[in-house]
Image (cartoon, rainbow, N blue to C red):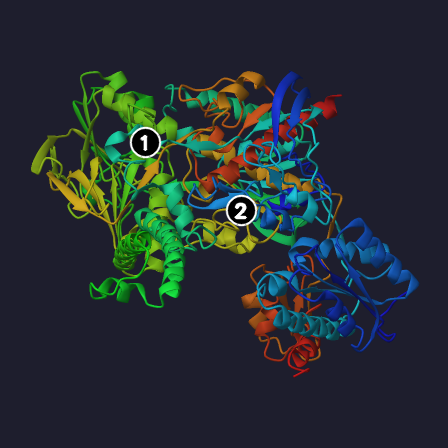
């Protein structure tokens, strides 16, 4: 990213969108809308003071809503360009309330609430569509419980848990425990509030709440509503403390040792996407290995049809994963996921090699969701005039693997079809070669 | 105007980085301290040293205060070191008389709650940086010419695609092919899928293009005999027709493909007649099979994904299913069964082909690696795990899907090019994920099955990709080496070859006449591994010499 951002020949237009394309190979005019960030890219140094002082928390999509960011934010720490953006949907200033703290603290004077979208008309010889992919929404498969059961997660969410820079600093914590911890914090706040009220009563009458309730019947404090109020407060306080301690105990003894990885969620599925998403078997194996590195008690079960480890070194990785990281590969598609009272997911499946229907309670379920063409591909294809295949990926022919149906417009990576990192990197070079050829051969002819 | 013999006049620029540093470290105190350090003649505080204003301050100070060393105490060198070095250069100071001290990532950012300690640490770091700066010497980078042409080794579909693309970008290409004709494995195929297309048409198209393009010189029946030189400046000896000719090129592309493994006789009753490989089947399908077989059984993973050869050859499932579809198309009454361990039909097109095969009546049967099928006279026995039964499949034609293996001469070529092979003798790319088409050694690129089994679309894409990588080099007028390279002191070097063996970039060679090692500054990446290895400190990394590093280390605890 850094290389692309700094390269003298690469003009990076981030937060921008193609709105129109005219012309033909060698001479395209492309209209680009550069959306307003409300931060001047040329002044912002990425120092982060604005986000530090911003009062508005927003659910962080990058961390898959497992953490919060601020209304002025960088999508992620290492983002290029290293500049901040204001999320106007949540920013107090843009929602009509008084704020502007970010502008006040920015020493580079980069915040500009009056910034407008800019339109750029580019004249180029070739175009490359590398718009990537989005992930299948697993809540479309209700029998898997995604969105209902807290401990059924999508793989991309699990990646955030495993990341040292993620919401749990790399610890595998079950979402039900994260929720319990959140509930504990909330209870702590309420307990503190009640403690303050109890404190003032204790000071007034010179005795502890416990002593007050234990007092013999004839020792009466005055007046009547203090008495009632005090005992009500104390009872409430005690109930909350008991509830919080129980939750804390649960979280302490909770563990995420037994992991189930469910393959082909939304892939190889006539109801959704008939194709294979290509890389999900590998990332499940990777995630199981990383989880094991972090917690030696981890045991993983990968439920799949074919475990497709076809890249260079991948088959060896899969075998090593099985041996060293206690991964059991089960040939069987998961039929249903249920959960116990304690939010313990249970996997129901047929082990096809044993020809038996079984179930397996686990601590955490990770769904390997399908790779789908990224949102907006259809609209972009219309703007560019390129054909899409039956699944919505940009269509290409195997003997011209990075060419689209429009001469001069090329494609690469998952925009074209689900492929993994080494193939995507290679294809990127391929598309660059085709684009260079298109431009240079015309230059020579001209 | 500034040189290392004169007494050091060091300028120190302490950056506030907005509040990133100044918010957690007492920058004025640090600046005040820097003024007390030996050889420091100027100290300035900047809000953002990397801003236009900050850069101008550095340039002005170099001229006005006759600075001959610059120290910037700010963020990480990964962000702005090149910018600061350039600024020094623009002001007339050798860019390597510059030292960067990281008081942000390595100080203010990690000691946000310890202002006093963080401030003391920043002072320590700057003291160390100043001490090293005093020991810095000016370094030069070398300017190299580039020969604007390429040589592609291998005239299969990947090699041809690479050659066409390079020629299309305007570069002359030499295309060297070992066989008498171009096309590689594509010559032996019956059909390509999807679409049951004739590979001959595709082949002719490419062969036509490379032979007719004036920029491409095709040499068939030829072999690479020698490779000398380095990035941008290779000299390749190619033998053909009984003579060897030398070609000067700037970049090399390895597109030598792979070989279909023929199982030893007897394995699965292989006999080349009734029990054959997929590639032999392709030939038979082209010639016409008469009479039609009644029952065809294909066995996957023959000699692949086993202990002797643990890798998955990736394309054999596609090939088997393609041929199964062909057989069903040509002989609708013939039964075809595919015995598999995993059906590696990854992605969109392959999965579709799998579905079509099922719809066309091809039968798929799962077998476990520990209970492989047994080929007998008229039958193939399979322990069908999913049914829990032993099945006896009638089979008058058995096809073994064998992996692609590395060419026998891969080790020879790897030695000539000085590039590595992996455990399976496939060429080893620079980085498995992020540099799939480059080697660690610069100027040489890789594509197709020489790297790892690849199907048609992948081979073409990789060929184009390798061309793009080569063009990145060939499009430059000159190459410049970095000044931070290793250098050997021939007086103390004993020629133990430790550095030669540890260098990851093949940048060091042994000079037998002088009995010492020599660094090629063009290939040297300044990693320092050699300097760490040398037992006599004869090889040193300029900009990180022992003297310079000891000066820093001595200062670590100097103030305590």
Q: Nearer the viewer, mark 1 or mark 2?
A: 1
Q: Are marks 1 and 2 on the same chain?
A: no
Is residue A236 at least partly visible in the picture? yes
What separation in Å lies between label 1 and label 2 (alpha carbons)? 37 Å
Q: How many residues crowd mark 1 within 10 Å: few (<14), some (14–19), many (20+)? A: few
Q: Is residue B126 above or below residue B161?
A: below
Give the chain letter at badge 1.
A
Q: Name the quarter where the C terminus of chain A is drawn.
A: top right
> Residue at coordinates 70% horizontally, 78% vertically from top-left?
B551
Q: Quadrant of residue A338?
A: top left
Position in image of residue A159 (x %, y %): 40, 47
B490 vs B272, nearest the viewer: B490
Q: State the residue position of label 1.
A: A139
Q: Residue lying farthest left?
A: B389
Q: State the residue position of label 2.
A: B435
Position in image of residue B391 (x %, y %): 9, 34
Q: Secondary structure at mark 2?
A: loop
B292 vs A241, nearest the viewer: A241
> Residue at coordinates 61% horizontally, 61% vertically from top-left?
B105
Position in image of residue B329 (x %, y %): 27, 17
Q: Secondary structure at mark 1?
A: helix
Q: How many residues crowd mark 2 within 10 Å: few (<14), some (14–19), many (20+)? A: some
A436 vs A141, nearest the viewer: A141
Q: Is residue A346 above or below residue A25?
A: below
| B114 sits left or right of B73 in the view | left
| B422 sits left or right of B511 in the view | left
Position in image of residue B265 (x %, y %): 23, 44
């Amino acid at each position: 990213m850094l290389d692309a951002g700094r390269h003298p020949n690469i003009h990076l237009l981030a937060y921008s969108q193609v709105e129109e394309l005219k012309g033909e190979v060698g001479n395209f005019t492309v209209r680009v809308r550069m959306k307003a960030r409300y931060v001047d890219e040329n002044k912002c140094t990425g120092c982060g003071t604005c986000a530090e002082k911003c009062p508005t928390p927003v659910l962080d999509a990058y961390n898959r809503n497992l953490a919060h960011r601020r209304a002025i934010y960088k999508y992620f720490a290492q983002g290029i360009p290293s500049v901040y953006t204001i999320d106007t949907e949540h920013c107090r200033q843009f929602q009509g309330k008084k704020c502007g703290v970010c502008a006040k603290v920015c020493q580079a004077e980069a915040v500009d609430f009056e910034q407008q979208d800019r339109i750029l008309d580019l004249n180029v010889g070739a175009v490359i569509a590398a718009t990537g992919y989005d992930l299948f929404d697993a809540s479309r498969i209700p029998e898997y419980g995604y969105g209902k059961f807290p401990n059924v997660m999508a793989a991309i969410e699990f990646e955030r848990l495993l990341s040292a820079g993620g919401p749990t600093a790399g610890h595998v914590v079950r979402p039900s425990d994260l929720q319990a911890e959140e509930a504990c914090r909330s209870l702590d706040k309420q307990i503190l509030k009640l403690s303050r009220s109890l404190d003032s009563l204790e000071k007034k009458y010179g005795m502890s709440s416990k002593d007050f309730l234990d007092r013999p019947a004839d020792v009466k404090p005055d007046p009547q509503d203090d008495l009632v109020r005090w005992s009500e407060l104390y009872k409430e306080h005690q109930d909350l403390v008991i509830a919080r301690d129980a939750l804390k105990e649960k979280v302490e003894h909770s563990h995420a040792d037994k992991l189930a990885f469910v393959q082909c969620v939304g892939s190889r599925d006539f109801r959704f996407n008939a194709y294979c998403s290509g890389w999900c078997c590998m990332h499940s194996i990777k995630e199981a290995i990383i989880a094991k590195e972090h917690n030696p008690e981890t045991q993983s079960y990968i439920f799949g049809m074919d475990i497709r480890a076809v890249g260079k070194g991948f088959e060896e990785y899969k075998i090593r994963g099985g041996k060293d990281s206690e991964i059991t590969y089960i040939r069987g598609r998961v039929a249903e996921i249920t959960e116990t009272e304690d939010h313990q997911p249970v996997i129901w499946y047929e082990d096809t090699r044993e020809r038996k229907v079984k179930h397996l309670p686990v601590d955490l379920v990770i769904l390997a969701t399908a790779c789908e063409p990224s949102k907006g591909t259809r609209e972009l294809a219309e703007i560019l005039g390129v054909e899409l295949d039956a699944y919505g990926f940009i269509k290409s022919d195997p003997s011209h693997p990075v060419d689209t149906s429009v001469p001069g417009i090329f494609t690469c990576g998952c925009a074209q079809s689900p492929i993994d990192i080494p193939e995507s990197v290679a294809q990127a070079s391929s598309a660059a070669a085709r684009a260079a050829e298109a431009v240079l051969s015309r230059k020579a002819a001209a | 105007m500034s040189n290392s013999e004169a007494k050091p006049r060091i300028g120190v620029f302490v950056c506030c980085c907005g509040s990133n540093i100044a918010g957690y470290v007492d920058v004025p105190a640090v600046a005040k301290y820097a003024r007390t350090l030996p050889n420091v003649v100027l100290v300035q505080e900047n809000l953002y040293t990397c801003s236009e204003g900050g850069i101008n301050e550095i340039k002005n100070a170099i001229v006005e205060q006759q600075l001959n060393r610059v120290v910037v105490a700010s963020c990480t060198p990964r962000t702005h070191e090149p910018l600061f070095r350039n600024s020094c250069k623009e002001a007339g100071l050798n860019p390597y008389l510059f030292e960067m001290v990281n008081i942000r990532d390595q100080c203010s950012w990690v000691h946000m709650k310890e202002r006093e300690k963080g401030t003391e640490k920043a002072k320590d770091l700057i003291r160390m940086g100043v001490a090293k700066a005093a020991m810095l010497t000016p370094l030069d980078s070398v300017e190299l010419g580039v020969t604007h042409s390429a040589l592609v080794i291998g005239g299969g579909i990947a090699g041809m695609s690479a050659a066409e693309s390079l020629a299309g970008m305007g570069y002359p290409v030499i295309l060297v092919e070992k066989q008498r004709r171009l096309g590689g494995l594509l010559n032996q195929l019956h059909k390509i899928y999807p679409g049951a297309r004739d590979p001959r048409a595709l082949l002719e198209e490419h062969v036509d293009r490379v032979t007719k393009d004036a920029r491409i010189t095709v040499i068939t029946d030829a072999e690479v005999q020698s490779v000398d030189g380095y990035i941008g400046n290779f000299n390749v000896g190619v033998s053909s027709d009984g003579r060897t000719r030398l070609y000067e090129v700037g970049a090399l592309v390895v597109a030598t493909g792979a070989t279909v493994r023929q199982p030893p006789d007897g394995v699965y009753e292989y006999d080349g007649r009734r029990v054959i490989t997929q590639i032999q089947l392709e030939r038979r399908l082209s010639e016409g099979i008469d009479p039609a077989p009644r029952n065809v059984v294909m066995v996957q993973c023959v000699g692949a994904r086993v202990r002797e050869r643990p890798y998955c050859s990736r394309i054999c499932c596609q090939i088997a299913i393609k041929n199964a579809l062909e057989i069903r198309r040509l002989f609708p009454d013939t039964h075809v069964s595919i015995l598999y361990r995993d059906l590696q039909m990854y992605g969109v097109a392959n999965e579709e082909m799998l579905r079509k095969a099922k719809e066309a009546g091809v039968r798929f049967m799962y077998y476990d690696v520990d209970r492989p099928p047994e080929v007998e006279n008229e039958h193939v026995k399979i322990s069908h795990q999913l049914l829990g039964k032993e099945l006896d499949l009638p089979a008058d034609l058995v096809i073994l899907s064998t992996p692609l293996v590395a060419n026998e001469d891969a080790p020879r070529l790897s030695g000539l090019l000085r590039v590595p092979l992996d455990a399976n003798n496939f060429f080893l790319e620079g980085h498995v994920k992020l540099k799939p088409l480059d080697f660690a050694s610069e100027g040489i690129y890789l594509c197709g099955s020489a790297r790892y089994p690849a199907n048609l679309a992948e081979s073409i894409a990789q060929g184009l990709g390798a061309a793009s990588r080569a063009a990145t080099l060939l499009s430059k007028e000159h190459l410049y080496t970095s000044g931070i390279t290793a250098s050997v002191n021939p007086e103390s070097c004993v020629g133990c070859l430790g550095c030669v063996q540890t260098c990851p970039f093949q940048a060091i060679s042994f000079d037998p006449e002088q009995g010492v090692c020599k660094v090629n500054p063009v290939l040297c990446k300044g990693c320092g591994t050699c300097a760490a290895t040398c037992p006599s400190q004869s090889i040193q990394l300029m900009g990180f010499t022992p003297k310079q590093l000891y000066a820093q280390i001595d200062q670590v605890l100097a103030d305590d």
